[in-house]
Amino acid sequence: MIRAGFGLVLGLLLFSTVEAYRIQRGFSDEAALIYHRHNAQDDAIYRLRRQLWLGANSSRDFLMNPAPDREIEYRKHLRLSRELSGKLLRQLDELGNGSEVTPRLRTKLHEYWDVLDRVPQDTGPMTNQQRYDYVQREIAARRSTLGDVLHEFAEVSRKVFRENEEALSASRRENALHLLFILGLSLVLAFAVAAFSLAHSESLERKTEKQYAEVARARAGLQQLAARLMDIQEEERTRISRELHDEIGQALATLRMEISRAESAARDRLPEVAARLGRARSLAEKTVQTVRNMCSLLRPSLLDDLGLGAALEWLAEDFTERTGVPCTLHLPESSEDLPDPVKTCVYRVVQESLHNCEKHAYASAVHVDVTRAGPSLSVSVEDNGVGFAGDAARRSPGKNCYGIPGMRERATALEGTLEVASSPGGGTRIRLVLPFEPVPERALLNPAEARP
């Protein structure tokens, strides 16, 4: 709709531009034609007057000396002037500004040249006084009459010229009004389209703001849901870890003790049974160790019992023991006044980062650095492995960047940030920054008060 409106406005503007050019061009051509015809007519009248004057002078000169040789020259000049006057008369006739006077002018002009042509015959036997009277009566009078006709012709021509000018001015005013109407219509339509566009834009802006607010609310809800799901996951892991440790772990420990007693009792009397019991005891010991490892992965008791520092030291030592890759750890002097969600987030991010190093980095050294700067905690896990492209975390989250979205969700839930810097062959660096408020000292003395 808006595009159609703007297209119509542009079309009208283009049409008005073309129309203005056409009108101006038409005015210029018509005005040039009018002035050209008027100037041509004035020039023809002037030249015709001159020919009449030259004809009269030629006759006067001949009458002053009517010799036979002068008659030949006189007729020659007379013929040329008569031919030229005929051409000028035809030119005036073609211009047509004095068409009602032209027939009378043609008649008078024909009579004038006929009189001049008969001058040698008519004035031959006359005396000088008779010749003078003849010139005044026949030639001067006719020339004066022709002058009056030419003057009348010029007046008619000027009248026609003024009428043409007035018609041209009227046509110009009419076309100007037509052009103003088109421009006014374009302006009104442009204002209408602009008003509609503004209203439509404001409507779209309100809809966009509303949708943005809805998206923001939905995103906040999703973040709260993700945070709640992670809390539930941690609680479930803690519960399962405790169940494994307290129930299954204790049962397996008791089973191992009972198998050891039975093995001791049967060692002398039933060696074969004792051997089987020994294998069962070894299996029970391995199962107990497996349960302990599972408990540590789910929720290490070190994190709850001894704090974040001890849990991170265990992660680093366990990583080095499993992979043979040295993992150095730098901890602040005190990290026990951190809230439990912060401790859990730091532990899980370091755990996931070391897991990625083990599976994908092919590194020869890993360094974990935990620092405090005012009300924020910074955790950095850096390796010298193969690295990956910067957008790999978005393209293939199942490869060397596995777990990064989850780590970022944990950081966002605590209003923190997680940055991943890596390049092919340049290693990987994961940096976590979390704001926190220190846990009061009385809450540290009574951990139950620090937990919701």
Image: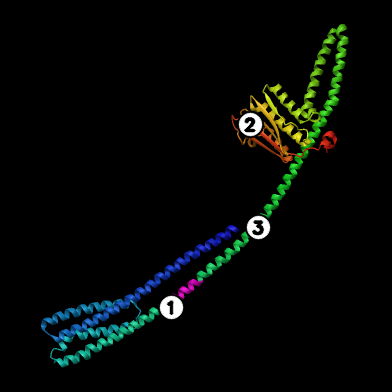
Residue 333 at x, y percent in the picture: 74, 31
In the picture, which quadrant includes the C terminus? top right
Horizontal relation, residue 170 to residue 400: left or right: left
Q: Quadrant of residue 233?
A: top right
Q: Secondary structure at mark 2?
A: strand
Look at the picture and state if 194 lies above or below 114. Answer: above
Query: Height in image: 165 above or below 295?
Result: below
Q: How many marks?
A: 3
Front disc: 1 or 3: 3
Which amino acid, by three-letter code, is at mark 1? Glu
Q: How is the image coloured?
A: rainbow
Residue 156: image location, x then y, percent: 36, 82
Residue drawn at (49%, 71%), measured in percent from left and top? 176
Does residue 120 appear in the picture of this structure? Answer: no
State how far apart marks 1 and 3 are (Cα).
53 Å
Estimate the spatial distance between the alpha carbons at disc 1 and disc 2, rounded to whole Å: 90 Å
Mark 2 vs 3, N-terminal side: 3
Upstream in sequence: badge 1 or badge 3: 1
**10 Å crowding of disc 3: few (<14), some (14-19), many (20+):** few
Residue topped by disc 3: 202
User: Which residue corresponds to mark 1?
Assistant: 166
* Image: 223 above or below 331: below
Q: Residues within 10 Å of mark 1 (few under 14, many from 20)?
A: few
Decide: is 330 above or below 104.
above
User: Which quadrant of the figure has residue 245?
Assistant: top right
94 left or right of 52 in image: right
Q: What is the x, y in percent for residue 368?
A: 69, 29
Q: Nearer the viewer, mark 1 or mark 2?
A: 2
